[in-house]
Image: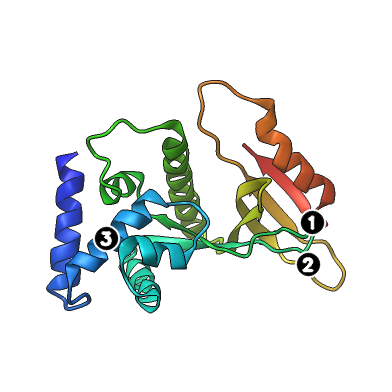
Amino acid sequence: MPRLASYLRTYLRQELLEEAIVRNLDPFRRFLDTVGLLNGQLLNKEAIARESHVKRTTIDHYFGILEDTLLGCFVNPWNPSLKAKESRHSKFYLFDSGVVRACAGLLNQHLKNNFLGFQLETLTLGHLRQYLSQTDKYFPMYHYTINGSYDIDFIVQTKKPVMGKRGAIVCIEVKFGKKYRLEWTKGMRDFCAISKDEIKVSM
């Protein structure tokens, strides 16, 4: 735990302040706190700006800093126009589940299952990106979310549809719990029934 806190302090001071990437650390700290708490959830940049007490235009700049310093990445929405309520909001994941906890200020607190679920998604995404990079498989990655209903955490497009031929995707659903629940497959089963792509499923 002390190492995570030290890592965050070092990043803020040496990487950002001393390199003059950020002039004032206080608003960036508040931004990081909010990003840590909302890690892996649908982005609402207006809400993040309000919670961080930072201008909306500054939020884009701050997310750009996190991407440029490899502290996190966006997962964009998959919109095949299969249903009316497909979300068009991206998600943002920090690169490490421990850093998520440090940013959120939860190093010394017991974590609830819903937060641990997003932690597990973060860990899975990190391994997935590492595998794709090491095997030179630079497939685009998305999430699929039906507002108010369900989401599929990661969709990897392994083949684009060309000249009337079907595309191919791999769907990955990440769940945290002590026991498997059948309702966890509801969204995946619904999506498989309506998708026009060739699908491989992993849970």
Residue drawn at point x = 35 percent, y = 52 percent:
36
Q: CA distance from mark 1 to mark 2?
A: 8 Å
Q: Amino acid at mark 1?
A: Asp
**Who comes first in sequence, dot 1 or dot 2?**
2
Q: Secondary structure at mark 2?
A: loop
Q: Secondary structure at mark 1?
A: loop
Looking at the image, the residue that sits furthest to the right is 164
Q: Return the mark for residue 197.
A: 1
Are there few (<14), some (14-19), or many (20+) residues within 10 Å of tag 2? few
Relative image position of residue 66 (x, y in whole percent) = 34, 66
Q: Is residue 143 above or below residue 4?
A: below
Which numbered mark, 3 or 1, is in the foreground of this view? 3
Q: Return the mark for residue 131.
A: none
Image quadrant holding the N terminus, namely: top left
Q: Which residue is mark 3?
A: 30
Q: Which residue is mark 2?
A: 161
Check whether the beta carbons of the residues at disc 1 and disc 2 lie within 8 A of each other.
yes
Q: Indicate left or right for 118 with 155 as reference.
A: left
